[in-house]
Amino acid sequence: MQYKIVASDLDGTLFNNKAEVSPENWAAIEQMHKMGVHFVPASGRSFGEMPVELRESPLIRYYICSDGSAVYDKHTGKSYDLAFPRDVGRQVLDKFYSYDVCIMLHADNVSYVEESTHNAEHYKSYHMNKYWVYFALFFDKPVSNLKELAYSLPAIQSFCVFFKNMEELQECKAFFEKDDRILVAQTDPCNLEVFASHAGKGNALWLLADVLGVPREATIGVGDSTNDMTMVQSAGLGLAMENAVPELKAAADEIICSNQEHSAAYILEKYIV
């Protein structure tokens, strides 16, 4: 099979343990670009939360953002949205605001947070590790009244929400899992990522393949966490990292190297060249 799209998760997949893209991976992405293969970052992050070197790289045009709630074309500025319908988004908000939570809300390819609590101490109180605190402080956009903004938006792409109380997290997770309009993933012990069931990285990958006229079987999806599940299951070739969660490994066609061993370079050598 001549693969034309490689959709790759970032944290724990493309990134090494220092949250960097290795020189080996950049060289592989460049080689794919020369071969006419689209390398597509596929992340729970909004486009604005992705590292600047990925956002500005001339080697990358398309981005799967916010757990597949948007596919962004950097060349045209067009965003193909798979957001929550407004009524469902408001129902999700109602549920979250019934708990003591810290909300990162994705809309218009931006992640919004509450300005009055936009500080390291507040984020740490919701069990965010150093990486998440840095991420929130430097990539998210604070607004003066997040709740008011949230209920006013015509469309919400996704939520990343941190809990203080783990019993409440499990209760909330179970509630959403019963609703077939909603998908929920957990990429950290203390968070939930929630997005529309018609979204997800798998549906976003298929949408992009259709836009590009690429057969769906000519796609590769690779990841390490539960929010990569639909992409790994939907891709023509679904790959799980050696460091992936067990359920993703069980769903994948193959298990490849760890994120410390240059996943893009591995994929280029084994499946494309």
Image (tube, rainbow, N blue to C red):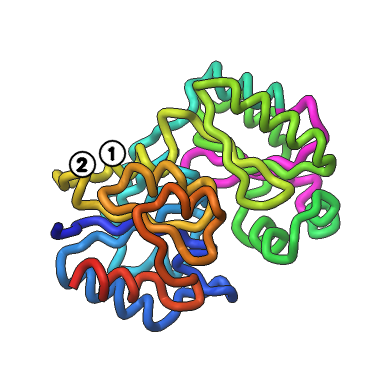
Disc 2 on helix, strand or loop? helix
If the image is split into quadrants, where does the N terminus sit? bottom left
The answer to whether residue 194 is above or below residue 151 is below
Verify CB contact (< 8 Å) between mark 1 and mark 2.
yes
**On residue 207, which mark appears?**
1
The answer to whether residue 259 is above or below residue 120 is below
Q: Work out whether residue 25 or residue 137 is closer to the camera in this orientation and state it.
A: 25
Q: Where is residue 199 in the image (x, y as percent from the top left)?
A: 42, 34
Disc 1 on helix, strand or loop? helix
**On residue 83, which mark appears?**
none
Q: Going by the picture, which residue comes out furthest to the bottom? A: 23
Packing grade of label 1 (10 A; few <14, some 14-19, many >=20) is some
Tell me the residue that label 2 is attached to.
Answer: 211
Residue at the spot x=40%, y=83% of the render? 23
Chain part drawn in magenta: 96-118
Residue at the spot x=50%, y=76% of the render? 260
